[in-house]
Amino acid sequence: MTIGDDAALQLVVSLHRLTRSLRRSATAGSIQLTHTAVLALLTQRGPSRIGEIAQWVPCSQPTATAAVLGLESAGLVRREADPDDRRASRVLLTERGSAALAEVARGEAQVLARRLSVLRPEEIRLLAEVEPVLRRLAEAGD
């Protein structure tokens, strides 16, 4: 079974809107969205160079550098020499950074839990059933 282009587009738009609104609601006054994206990427991909971070976020290299500097000054990431090229450095997530990302995720989950109250019980069950499918789709691109 396949899904049409229009239906796929609407799904993408809805997922983006939901994700953005959860992040805005949960992280107000907390970690910047770009910083959250960098922390999430480091969690998923491990130690990375600035250029890789810029590519994955996606953002410009100066934006990635600024984000890393902010995260580094907050103790959420640290830099070390790249073992493959000592002239370069790579960025690593610290325990504090991991905890901060988990806190952001908990905040988003709390916002989502409140929003679920507008749904009918069968819609909530449907969402719970589709979560593993969405996870597989997210992981398929790696």
Image (tube, helix red, strand yellow):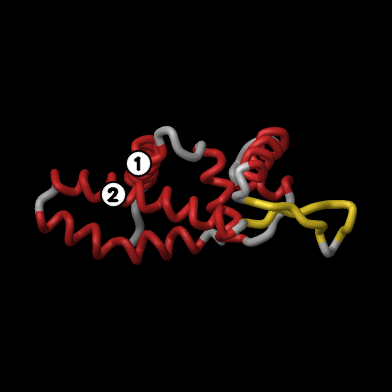
Q: Residue at x 36, y 53 (%)?
A: 106
* 108 is higher (above) or lower (below) than 99: above
**Residue type at the position of mark 2:** Gln
Q: Can residue 6 be seen in this view?
A: no
Q: Residue at x 10, y 56 (%)?
A: 121
Residue linked to disc 2? 110
Q: Where is residue 58 in the image (x, y as percent from the top left)?
A: 60, 41
Q: How far apart are marks 1 and 2 (CA)?
A: 9 Å
Q: Is mark 2 on a helix, strand or loop?
A: helix
Mark 1 crowdedness (10 Å alpha carbons): few <14, some 14-19, many ≥20:
some
Are discs 1 and 2 less than 8 Å apart at CB? no
Q: Residue at x 88, y 58 (%)?
A: 86
- 7 vs 128, nearest the viewer: 128
Q: Is mark 1 on a helix, strand or loop?
A: helix
N-term-proximal mark, 1 vs 2: 1
Q: Can residue 27 be seen in this view?
A: yes
Mark 2 crowdedness (10 Å alpha carbons): few <14, some 14-19, many ≥20:
some
Q: Where is residue 10 in the image (x, y as percent from the top left)?
A: 33, 41
Tell me if 13 is positioned left or right of 81 in this view: left
**Residue type at the position of mark 1:** Leu
- 115 vs 142, nearest the viewer: 115
Q: Which quarter of the rendering shows the N terminus?
A: bottom left
* 59 is higher (above) or lower (below) than 104: above
Residue linked to disc 1? 22
